[in-house]
Amino acid sequence: MFINHELINELLKNAQNATENDVDNVLNKACNRENLTFEDIAVLLEIKNENQLDKLFKIAGEIKNEIYGNRVVLFAPLYISNYCVNDCIYCGYQRCNKFERRRLTQDEIREEVKILEKMGHKRLALEAGEDPKNCPIEYILESLDTIYSTYNENGNIRRVNVNIAATTVNNYKKLKEKGIGTYILFQETYHKPTFIKMHGKSIKNDYYYHLTAFDRAMEAGVDDVGAGVLFGLSDPKFEVLGLMMHNAHLEEKFGVGFHTISFPRLKKAEGMDLNSFPHLVSDDLFKKIVAITRLAVPYTGIIMSTRESSSMRNKLLKYGVSQVSAGSITGVGGYKENEKDENINQFTLEDHRTPIEVLKELISDEYIPSYCTACYRMGRTGDRFMSLAKSGEIHNVCTPNALTTLKEFLLDYGDKQLQDMGDKLINNEIEKIQREDIKNIIYNNIKSLKEGERDLYL
Ligand code: SF4
Ligand code: SF4
């Protein structure tokens, strides 16, 4: 099996003897943009010296900027069904929690999508619990059609990432045919004994089947896969090495690793007590883990959800986070019902800002909020995407697309204050661009947007 528990334990044990000199050597490798080994990553996980920590954070921020520039991609989750046959003890949707389960009708999905479009969203993560009877693949496929075909004034959803339970090659083929963006699946924990303990009598409780879901997805032609663990279930250092081994396995077998990694931390949910989880991750360790991941897999998108507070999210943006959700609701039908404060969430959220508030803060901190979905639509997926990212050329499409989609947002959804802030940022960012051809593309795009054209990208 490609998650070698013995090796991970040995690497972690040996790293405890790492000296500050050893840490410096690894940081220098990262500075020189050399690939890090599992051993190097284990050493970084042991950093305690404040100066070395600062250096780690600085390198992580530099790498993110070098590859993707200062753009931050925005998305929102859309929960369509909370039926679930599993008993994951950390989740509010676990089978033994008794509440009235529901799945949205196609009309209800349309309503939710229209609300999300009015918020300016173009990129969604579709979420559903596992229930072959009440939430079969056919329902997911129909829902994807509904989402992609729902328009609201200037709004349309241009990329739907899908987070559903591990399934068969055949079902992944069907998802691919519907034009999904990334297929997202969290391993929850790479530590097999913990995985088994967390999932009780559930169909999800098949470590190997869950672990090999991306192999089946890639066999089915899904190029972009998004991983994650739920930090807090098991030793976080073990989880980081588990993620890296999983990524290395996919790179070796399919030539391309994770498109994204999400960093959820365990939060309070219905039917569980946080005190019964001994591996909760402190803020300091969490920041370190995110920064180390940026050094270890420089080209992989790092996603931070609204589980984290706005101040934590702002800090992590400096250490390598490249995508954030905004205005999220994690209950089925929650966007509509939020107005009535009735929704049942999968877990508790910390960042309750609206997308406009998030955008204002990003712009104040000199990030470019981006609603870009271009790569997937231009066929830049899998190894085609990775080769652009590795050559540094992705920068040349990320920045113009970020500025164009920000301008589109300002025109369609911005208030006066945001429009002023956004226009100022756009002008400053265009000034910084060296290539005249790229500047001209952005000027032309802005002109076309003002004339009423939409959905421009390269
Ligand atoms: Fe169901 Fe997913 Fe929650 Fe487990 S984590 S109970 S599979 S919704
Ligand atoms: Fe993402 Fe590609 Fe757009 Fe850059 S150009 S923001 S990598 S979709």
Image (cartoon, rainbow, N blue to C red):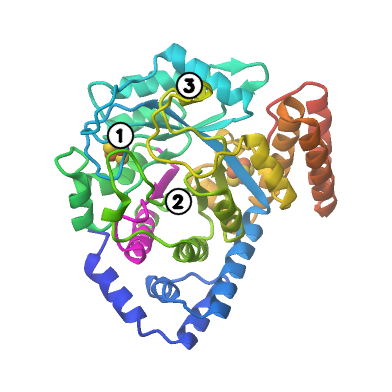
Magenta stretch, residue numbers: 222-250
Quadrant where ligand 1 appears: top left
Check contact, mark 1 vs mark 3: CB within 8 A: no
Q: Would you call the spot at circle 3 few (<14 residues within 10 Å), some (14-19), or many (20 or more)?
A: some
Within 8 Å: ligand 1 and the Cβ of disc 1? Answer: yes
Residue at the spot of label 2: 261
Residue at the spot of label 1: 93
* Residue 337, disc: 3
Residue drawn 68% across and 41% down?
A: 359
Please state the horizontal and vertical placement of residue 215, each as a whole percent of the image: 31, 46
Earlier residue among tags 1 and 3: 1
Q: In this view, does 61 lie above or below 229?
A: below
Query: Residue 237 occupies which quadrant of the picture?
Result: bottom left
State the separation of the CA atoms marked 2 and 1: 23 Å
From the image, which quarter does the N terminus lie in?
Answer: bottom left
Given the image, on which type of amino acid does mark 1 rest? Tyr
Earlier residue among tags 2 and 3: 2
Query: Residue 99 occupies which quadrant of the picture?
Result: top left
State the SS at label 1: loop
Given the image, on which type of amino acid does mark 2 rest? Ile
Residue drawn 57% across and 21% down?
A: 115
